[in-house]
Image (cartoon, coloured by chain):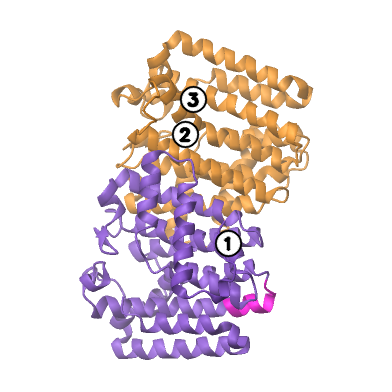
Chain colours: A orange, B purple
Amino acid sequence: MLELKTPQLLSDDELLAHVERALTQTIAARSLAAKLKEATHYALLGGGKRVRPLLCLHCCAAASGNMDNAMPAAVAIEMIHAFSLVHDDLPALDNDDLRRGRATTHVAFGEALAILAGDALLSIAMEQALSSKIGAAHIAHELATSTTEMISGQVLDTLGGFPTNFNAAQQLELIHRQKTGALIRAACRMGAFAAGATADTLDRFTRWGETMGLMFQVVDDILDETQSSEHLGKSAGKDAVQGKMTYPKIHGISWSRDHVKELLAQSEQLLKPLGPAAQPLRTMAQTLATRTK
Amino acid sequence: MLELKTPQLLSDDELLAHVERALTQTIAARSLAAKLKEATHYALLGGGKRVRPLLCLHCCAAASGNMDNAMPAAVAIEMIHAFSLVHDDLPALDNDDLRRGRATTHVAFGEALAILAGDALLSIAMEQALSSKIGAAHIAHELATSTTEMISGQVLDTLGGFPTNFNAAQQLELIHRQKTGALIRAACRMGAFAAGATADTLDRFTRWGETMGLMFQVVDDILDETQSSEHLGKSAGKDAVQGKMTYPKIHGISWSRDHVKELLAQSEQLLKPLGPAAQPLRTMAQTLATRTK
C-alpha cells in the first residue's frame, strides 16, 4: 500500500493524487485477462470527484486514525461506485453514452465487457476491503451490505415497486437513501472502522454520513435541472426527460436550495464536538453543498 | 443459521434439502426491493445440482470440521455460481434463453433486473461469507479472489485476448481453470477454512479441488457434445455452434473420456491418506465423473 507519511498535512489535491495512484495500482497489480484489465482501468480511472474516498480518508483522520489504514477502504468504495456507474449506464438500464465527458464503458468496450468489468470491480473491491490492516471484517461487511442496499435502490429507481402506501416524496427519499446514501454513509463508517473508533464516534459518523448522502443527492438533482450537459460532463435534464422523481420536481427549486442549507447546518451540529480535527470534514460539506458539477 | 445436529450422518438428499433451505432463507431474510427479491430468488432457487455447496460441506467434514460452520460458505459459493449464470446468459454474452429447463432470468424478468439481480447475488454472497463463524476472513477472501478469477475466465471465453504464445490446448486449459476451476477449488478450500484445517490439509484440498474442477469441465464438454438439450435442460451443442473450444474438439472424445478416468485416479491418490473420513468425497468424485447431465 501507499505510504502517507504525514497524511494529515496533505492538501486535498495531494490526497487526491494519492487516491488516483492507489486506484491505478489496485488494477495494475492484479492478474486479469488483458481486455478485462483495460476495461476496469478505463471505468475506474476516468476522472471523477472521488467524493467517497475523500470522505473515508477524512473520517478516519477525524476519528484520530492513520489515513494510511483507510486507503484500502477508500479504494474499495470508489470501485463499488465505479461498478455501479458502469452497470447503470448500460442500454438495458439508463442507456447513457456520456460520463465525465467521455464515452461510457459499454460504448468504448462493448456491452459484454462492460457487464463483466462491472462485476470484476465489485469483486476486486471486496478483496481490497479485506486487505485493510485495522477493522477488515467490519469494513468488508459494511462494503457488502451497503452495496446490496445501493443495488436495491437502483432497482426501485429503474423499475419501481414501492410499498403501496408510499407517496412521491417518500418514494424519492427511499430511492436516494439506498441508491446514493448507502455508499456515502458506508464511506464515512469505513473510515471510522479503519481508525478503530468507539461506538459513539461511529454513530456520529453514521449520522453525518447520512446527512452528506442526502445533501449530495439534493444538490445532484438541482444541478441536473439547472446546468448544461457540457458543464456536467454527463447528460443533464435526463431526469425530467425520463420522468424521474427529483427534489426540485417534488418540492420546488427554492425548497431544495433551502434544504441544502438545513443539511449543512445539521452537519455543523454533528461535527461541533469534534473540534478542529473535523475541519477537513467541514470543508468537504461546504464543497459538496456549493459544487456546480 | 441452520442446525445440522449430526450432519455427518445425513444422506446427500437430506444435505441438499438443508442447502435449499439455507439458500431460501438467505434471500428471504434480507430487506430488498420486492422485484429484486423475486428475481434473486428465481435465479438462485431454480434447481441446479448444488455441486459447489456439497463440495464445501463435505470438505469441511472430511477435515474434521462441523458442517454447520461451512453452511454460510456453501451458500455464498452457490450464490456466486448463480450470479455468474445470470450474467453469462445475458443477450450481450451467451444469449441463452433456457437454463435448467426453464426461462433464464433475463427472459423471465427483463435484462435490467437480471443485471441487477446478478450484482445483488454477488454482494449478498460476500455478506454471507463474512458471517462464517470460523475462518470468516479467509473464506471471504477466497470467495472474492476466486470470483475475480472466474470473471477473468469468462472474459477470455467470450472475448479472447490470450497471451500470443498460447496454443489452442493451453487456451482451453486457461479458460477452464479460471472459469469453472476457480470456484470449485474455492468451494473445497472454504470448507477446509471452516474446519480450521492445517496448511497441509488445506494444500491437499486445494489440489483435490483443482482436480475436481478440471474433471467437471471435461465431463461438461463431453455432455455438451453427446446429449440432447432436452436431457441437459440447457442448450446442448452450443459450444460447437459458437465455435468454442472444448476438450472433445481439441483432443477427441476418446482422449477426453480417458482423461476423466485419469483425473478420478488422481483424486483417489489425493484422498487416500484421509481414510474413511473422505468417503463422501470419493462418492462425489465418482458422481461427477459419471454424471449424464
Could you tell me which quadrant the N terminus of chain B lies in? bottom right
Nearer to us: label 1 or label 2: 1
The reply, left or right, for residue B215 in relation to residue A63 is: left
Give the main secondary structure of the magenta stretch. helix
Q: Residue at x 26, y 66 (%)?
A: B234
Q: Compare residues B271 and A116 and report the one nearer the observer.
A: B271
Q: Which residue is mark 1?
A: B3
Q: Report the magenta residues as a range.
A: B197-205
Nearer to us: label 1 or label 3: 1
Which chain letter goes with mark 1?
B
Quadrant in which residue A33 is drawn: bottom left
Quadrant in which residue A187 is drawn: top right
Mark 3 vs mark 2: which is more N-terminal? 2
Q: Residue at x 59, y 67 (%)?
A: B5
> Are the numbered discs 1 and 2 placed on the same chain, yes or no?
no
The reply, left or right, for residue A106 in relation to residue A148 is: left
Look at the numbered disc 1 and give the secondary structure of its residue.
Answer: loop
Q: Position of residue A128 (x, y in %)?
A: 60, 52
Amino acid on which the number 1 mark rests in the picture: Glu
Amino acid on which the number 2 mark rests in the picture: Lys
The reply, left or right, for residue A68 in relation to residue A185 is: right
Q: Which residue is mark 3?
A: A217
Amino acid on which the number 3 mark rests in the picture: Gln
Q: Position of residue A34 (x, y in %)?
A: 44, 60
Q: Residue at x 29, y 60 (%)?
A: B94
**Can you say whether A171 is above or below B3 in the image?**
above
Q: Compare residues A235 and B163 and report the one nearer the observer.
A: A235
Q: Which residue is mark 2?
A: A179
